[in-house]
Image: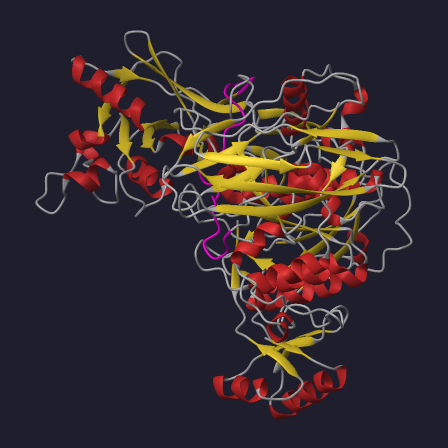
Amino acid sequence: MGAKGSSDDHIHLMSSLTTRRKNAVVHSYKNSFSGFAARLSDDEAQSIAQHPGVVSVFPDPVFQLHTTRSWEFLRDQYNLVHNFPYSSHSNSTSNGADTIIGIFDTGIWPESESFNDKGIGPVPSRWKGTCTRGYDFKSSSCNRKLIGARFYDEPGEFKTPFTGTPRDHDGHGTHVAAIAAGTPVAGASYYGIAGGTAKGGSPGSRIAVYRTCKPYSGCSGSDIMKAFDDAIADGVDIINLSFGQPAGTEFEFSKNPIAIGAFHAVQKGIFVVASGGNDGPSPESVVNVAPWIFTVAATTIDRNIETHIPLGGNMLIKGGGISFSDLKKSPVYPLVDSLSVKLDSEIVFDGPARDCEPDTLDERKVKGKIIVCDHLTDDFSLEVRLNEVKKKGGIGFILSIPDDQLITAPKIGSFPGAVITQGDGTKIRSYINSTRNPVATILPTVSVDNFKPAPVVAFFSSRGPNYNTRNLLKPDIAAPGTAILAAWTANDTEVTRSGKQPPLFNIESGTSMSCAHVSAIVATLKSQNPSWSPSAIRSAIMTTAFQQSNLKSPIVNSVYGESLATPYAFGAGVATMSGPLKPGLVYETEITDYLQFLCSTGYDTSTIKLISKTLPNDFPCPTGSSDDSVSNMNYPSIAVSLSKVRETKEVTRTLTRISDEESEYTVIITAPDVLRVEVSPKKLKFTSDRKKLSYQMTFKAMSRERIFWINNMDQCRGRINQGSRRCHGTHKPLAELIYSMYIWKKLHIY
């Protein structure tokens, strides 16, 4: 992949390559950045890199793909935390009119009712895109809701059912698009589970699809760059990216197609939202961490997918997973531990048999019984273990998995089955060992609303801190991403119940789903505040997020434990729909802030041109830039690193008043004993001629204790002399090597 200097150099090099070898050039980028993707040998790449017009040459990376109740949950939870009564105007899901969301994903299933255009007005005149035909996709497949569709396949690429079309043959892109902007569809469910009206968070928005990803082969960096180039020229307002590299492998910004493309989009005023990754709960696993990208983590909602397992003796185990059991409701079926039905063979060991690995169970012992298996290793999938039980004549399947994986509601299918926590696995085995004839049954899966606690940070959601960038807190925000119901492709046999037609809606989990939720909130804000910059919208969402569950207690990492979540897990908190509409103040981050950030992380001006080909004439990298300088970027969160006692760091932030009314804000700080925090000035007074004001914060380490501190203030908004509401903060010791601090909105109107 090459990024070029002048257009003449671009054309000359492309022509020379095409002359030497047919189909050498794969994509040409010309709308927003100049360059092309080509098939090159190592020698050719090195030769081209020496050309005076070439800025950079780097390999083409491959990225991996990372609703009926979620929107009501976000609204109701925000109202609960802030003691606001429900009102119709607080539901922003009716907004987002004419905002254009670009979905970079696996394509779309245009026939889904979630994308019908009934009652939607004409396509906005500013739209310059196209609806590309494919072998199974007509130009007429687009409408006033789905206004654009493109796909990216290499010339001469081997044809498969997944190429040559913008149609979604995976389901992921359809699901994401429907969550973000799907038209309301009544009576939606996955075979009766999670029933209700499925709707996108911004049903008034338009959808433009850019099929950058293929099933099984991932998302090509060159395709992603081409999609950015097209989307910027087409006129999208928001770009939704639900993919990224695996944790710990993300390229540096100058060689990262997502970071480069997103930078050019943001320069044009386009908001870029990206999933933070599904490699949690390990620390330093978050990806898509460039500060110009809005990085999203995943949480649960207050709906739980449950599969109940009645045992003999009136015992009941509440498991998870999705299955459609046809067993009797009474516990009358023999229940056994997989270890007791293993093959009598010298080569079958206890561990694999306990895991129900292939060819480890004895058909004579398994037949007619419900088998309890473990998940001790990740060597085999749930489906492989299930098939071992099914093949050997079992009538039911129970799998003990790590506790928090239940929230993803893995699909088991028509065979009676359930997944349970390891603790419940111990309870079931104790029951088996306590009686001569242990019995059980497995009931059909049900969805349970008003589940508590919620939200909880999803176990799979990638965590900070950034493995390669200090003093920048990522993820930025969290949103619902577990067991989300939304539209699906209508030909997917893998999720089809035996003897039934393929489902039109499916339940999926991932930061991809949470990313789509945030894109919808951004679309609503953009439609109602068209003059707001991408950074103003980001600030409004971050400074109005909430950090409390429906138990009115801090958000935790686990439904089953007491581990408090930190900003490394949820960023500023969980995004809301109505709060960002009136943020009061915002932190606006300029393009020059991002350039200064790159200087602080070790880039010089010539290297920065690998990301931004045009720099302001008077822009220099400041002398002495270091990663400590990152803390001074005008970002809605603040992270500082303190390595020794009495060490002091100072940071500056500038706030912009959104409204035209005069107002005064007063700082409230809650800090742990091991950290001293001072703010100057203590008050900021905004007048008719003062819309921007700055303040300084000083941090001083007072102890060797390593801590992570979060000042998670309530919104505490009000007019001058109208009183105040109590704000609060929490802190929790962590085994961190540095002191980090996240400051939420610390200046509050009185």
Taking the view exactly as shown, the residue that stands out farthest to the left is 346
In which quadrant will I find the C terminus? Answer: top right
Region in magenta: 448-470
Task: Return the x and y of residue 463 as percentages of the image width and height.
Answer: 47, 43
In front here: 7 or 682?
A: 682
Write the residue at 63% across / 66% down: 622
Magenta stretch encompasses residue 64: no
Task: Return the x and y of residue 363 as percentages of the image width and height.
Answer: 21, 35
**Height in image: 338 above or below 171?**
above
Write the residue at 79% across / 33% down: 685
Q: Main secondary structure of the magenta part?
A: loop
In front here: 291 or 164?
A: 291
In which quadrant will I find the N terminus? Answer: bottom right
Task: Return the x and y of residue 434 as percentages of the image width and height.
Answer: 17, 13
**Height in image: 110 above or below 67?**
below
Q: Quadrant of residue 352?
A: top left
Taking the view exactly as shown, the residue that stands out farthest to the top is 314
Label total for image: 0
Asked if residue 666 lies left or right of residue 320, the reply is right
Asked if residue 673 lies left or right of residue 56, the reply is left
Write the residue at 35% across / 18% down: 441
Task: Return the x and y of residue 6 as percentages of the image width and height.
Answer: 74, 82
In front here: 419 or 4?
A: 4
Asked if residue 7 lies left or right of residue 518, the reply is right
In front here: 579 or 440?
A: 579
